[in-house]
Image (cartoon, helix red, strand yellow):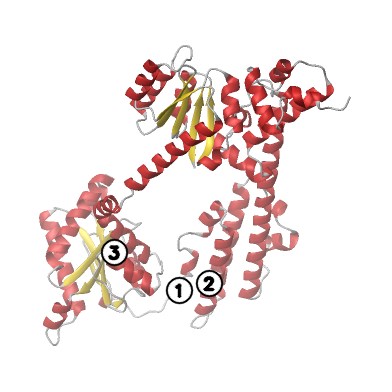
Amino acid sequence: MLQLLLVDDERSVVETLAETIPWESCGIGTVHEALSGAVALEIMENHDIDIVITDIRMPEMSGIALITAIHEKWPHVQTILLSGHADFEYAKQAIAQESFDYLLKPVSDEDLIESVQRVVNRIKEKWESAASYQRALHVFQDNLPLLRSTMLHELLTGKIYDQKTLSEKLDLLELPYSVGEDLGMLVIRMEEHLSEMAQSDLALMEYAICNIISEVMQGHFHIWHTRDVHDYIVVLVTMKPASKMSLKKDEKPQTLLEHYAAQIQTNVQSYLKGAISISVSNWGEFPYEIEEIYERAVMSMRKRMGQTQGLFVTASDETDIHPLPAIRSLYKPPTLISLLEAGRFEDIEQKIEIIFEELLHSGEQHDIAESTIEVYYALAGAFAYIIHKNGKQISSVLPMESYRYFQAPNYSTAQQLQEWSIRTLHYIRDDADQELKDNHSTIVRSVKSFVDLHLASDVSLPAIADHVHLHPVYLSKVYKAETGEALTAYVYRLRMEKAAYYLRTSTTKVFEIAELVGYNNTAYFIRVFKKFYDVTPQEYREKLPV
């Protein structure tokens, strides 16, 4: 939805337009109000305004001067000028400043809505044009290396694609890999002065190293590389079909990969004057074993190399051991903590189910007692973190039977631990929902109190938002979600109901009632009253029983 700014030095004009026009049906989500050009420019600085409707004749800064300033700084903003004078000079100036439309006051609702709708359609057409196929294709090609790197990083950290999606994405990124193909991997750590460079220089050095890798290996291997969270360069390779055919009878892809890796290490030392350590993985199946191969290579990098520099380790150096596996789904992004912070409770519940599926599956090869402890502390830590971050104590959010698990874990099976974690998650979700509901109710009460007390003065959306210390767009969404009524519609309705009350219970003159409910212009008040009740204020009063 777009954002619109109304500018007029007559408050009643601005507020009437804000309240009575069905803006949402025109594609407008938020309406801002300004009583001068200076205030309008301030609002422009703080909000992403799409359309400005402004009067021409205003003190200090005219509408022409305002749209001139707007088009200089925000050339994408569309403007509509209102004028009480059918003056050709004004129209010429509006055309010169490329104003979208020029309407005469008093403008009818229908004419204004039609003009705004045409502006909205123009903006939509502009954005659709900007997102055209050719432009998107050009941007895609520019970002192809980054997109490839991102996809490999996702695969390294355990992202799973179904076979159709994977094939489509590989084709889109022009990557010559296929499901079930044999793959190898190099993990490269930059050392000496290379690792001490600034990030921008490090990226250039990564580019230079990858060029050397490509130069050395491209005759026999397809190459796909990224930089991981440890700043290691990770290179995934598969053999080209022609290279497989040319291998000697006793020659293996692993031997060839190790030979090239040693050559890369030498060339980096010779040409870039820096040391690198390389871990050459064993081979596996694409894409199912990428994560496992990567983790073993990184583990080898840490265990076998430590802080020693310029080393070369291959899969054949690894001892055949079967360590107790970590529960990987605990640490795959998005993590439990990030999901809790985002309030994605359904996704957290699904993640917990995946964690326990993996835990139980690992029990087929190992005793899961140790792994269950790992899962318990990860879950309890994440739950305690989010409760404390929300400024609460665990005992105030959870009932005693769940709280006891934090004091002394009381599970004898993985199933019991899973049931406790789901119950605890539901308690945290319910507490968050109640807090949000309470906060929203408090905001609505504060808004209604403010509007009721200041109905005769400034009850524009920016003024109300400032009072409750919220962004106007967010306030509008909260109010409508909580009450089912737009905030501007509420202000309009309240003004009309109060005006009707004064007409029924007093002999106050119509122009005085208009001022009591916030309209300085009596003619405008009569107009909006008739729109609401289908009769003028005087007709309303005359129809009352004696």
Q: Quadrant of residue 20?
A: top right
Q: Is residue 291 visible?
A: no
Q: Is residue 276 left or right of residue 516?
A: left
Q: Quadrant of residue 467?
A: top right
Number of residues whose C-alpha sits closer than 10 Å to that of mark 1, classed few (under 14), some (14–19) or many (20 or more) = few
Seen from the viewer's position, the closer of residues 90 and 443 is 90
> In front: mark 3 or mark 2?
3
Number of residues whose C-alpha sits closer than 10 Å to that of mark 2, classed few (under 14), some (14–19) or many (20 or more) = some
In the figure, 338 relative to 58: above or below?
below
Q: Is residue 473 visible?
A: yes
In the rendered structure, are the residues bearing label 3 and label 2 in contact, judged by CB atoms less than 8 Å apart?
A: no
In the rendered structure, are the residues bearing label 1 and label 2 in contact, judged by CB atoms less than 8 Å apart?
A: yes
Identified by mark 2, the residue type is: Ser
Whole-angstrom CA distance, mark 1 to mark 2, is 8 Å
For mark 2, give the secondary structure.
helix
Q: Which residue is mark 3?
A: 172
Residue pictured at 14% horizontal, 60% vertical = 212
Which mark is on residue 371? 2
Whole-angstrom CA distance, mark 3 to mark 2, is 40 Å
Residue pictured at 53% horizontal, 30% vertical = 32
Which mark is on residue 325? 1
Residue pictured at 41% horizontal, 69% vertical = 160
In what quadrant of the picture does the C terminus appear? top right
Q: Position of residue 78 (x, y in %)?
A: 40, 32
For mark 3, give the secondary structure.
helix
